[in-house]
Image (spheres, rainbow, N blue to C red):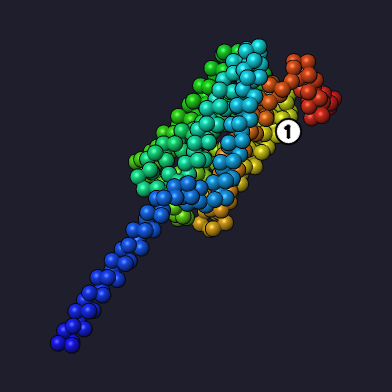
Amino acid sequence: MLSISWSSALQVSIPSESNSSTRIANISIINSHDRPFYNWLVKCHGFWHNFALIVPSALFILYLAFHAKQSYKKLWIGRSHIINSYYMIVWLVSLLNFAWCCLQTWECTPGKTLAWNLLTFITTSGFLFLEVSLVAFLLQGNYTTGVEALSWTFAVSGLVVGLDVLLKGIYIFAFGVPLFIENDDKTNQMKWGLLMVHKVALTAVYGFILFMYHSKWRERLPARPAYYKYITIMFCINAFAFLACALSGSGFGCWLYDTITICYHAFYLPLIYGTFLADFFQEDDLNLENVYYSEMKDAGFFDID
């Protein structure tokens, strides 16, 4: 009788321990769902990653909003098709980029893969459109505001972006390559190979423009040193991104690529605004001509060879 009762006691205690572990698991799940803000800010990539993305993008949108009324008046007076179009595109891409920065947890959330891929597709395509259109504008050789120049610039940009979207779409949806998912897969040759081709192409384009600027053909390009400072920065960014892709098999390569991605999404839009739009909004016509003349003189455009 004693052994039977002891055995019964053991049989009772085992389910009790199992129920306890189940309750602990349920409590942890409930706590996880009770802290959505914590999960949004800290989970997936970590606090500092999200902070470095969200804060600069939010500050830039606030800057645009604060100067929106003044900018609208200047746009109405200036009636420049290119400036007006660029200003609207910068606004659109800034909002998309802010949403992308705030929704980083989608990348690590089951069931959000398609939404994350689409959001990243649209956002990165907007960035690429700005990059290509500014390069196309520079290669025209003059600061024109005509509809024909705008149409040519946007046609070239749309063609390049369309090909980029088509290629990436095939990789993601046909071959299942996780281009926009950081899953610590350092050996995915298709993913890093495509990214290397993308970065080396942009590096070559920016390098070619820098070569033209330092050659006898620089007079065919707009005589504004601010544009070429932008080209130099973008050349360095894409060159380092290419290096990071080449070193993707190591931890340093992945860290470098992630760092470049953060810097690009956080600071590219303020960079292009400061390069292409800021002077238009902040200076009157006479002062703007003096600024351009000073920049051209400092860069040696009036030197006699």
Q: Nearer the viewer, residue 10 or 229?
A: 10
The C terminus is located in which quarter?
top right
Query: Residue placed at 51% from the left, 47% from the top?
Result: 41
Would you identify the image quadrant in which residue 293 lies? top right
Q: Tell me if residue 258 comes above or below residue 59 in the rendering.
A: below
Q: Tell me if residue 301 comes above or below residue 188 in the rendering.
A: above
Give the percent coordinates (x, y) of residue 273: 64, 29
- Residue type at mark 1: give it: His
Residue 199: in sight, yes or no? Answer: yes
Residue at the disc numbered 1: 214
Q: Determine the residue located farthest toward the right in the rendered image.
A: 304
Query: Residue placed at 28% from the left, 68% from the top?
Result: 18
Give the percent coordinates (x, y) of residue 183: 44, 52
Query: Residue placed at 52% from the left, 35% from the top?
Result: 97
Would you identify the image quadrant in which residue 53 lies? top right
Query: Residue placed at 46% from the left, 38% from the top?
Result: 120
Give the percent coordinates (x, y) of residue 160: 50, 29
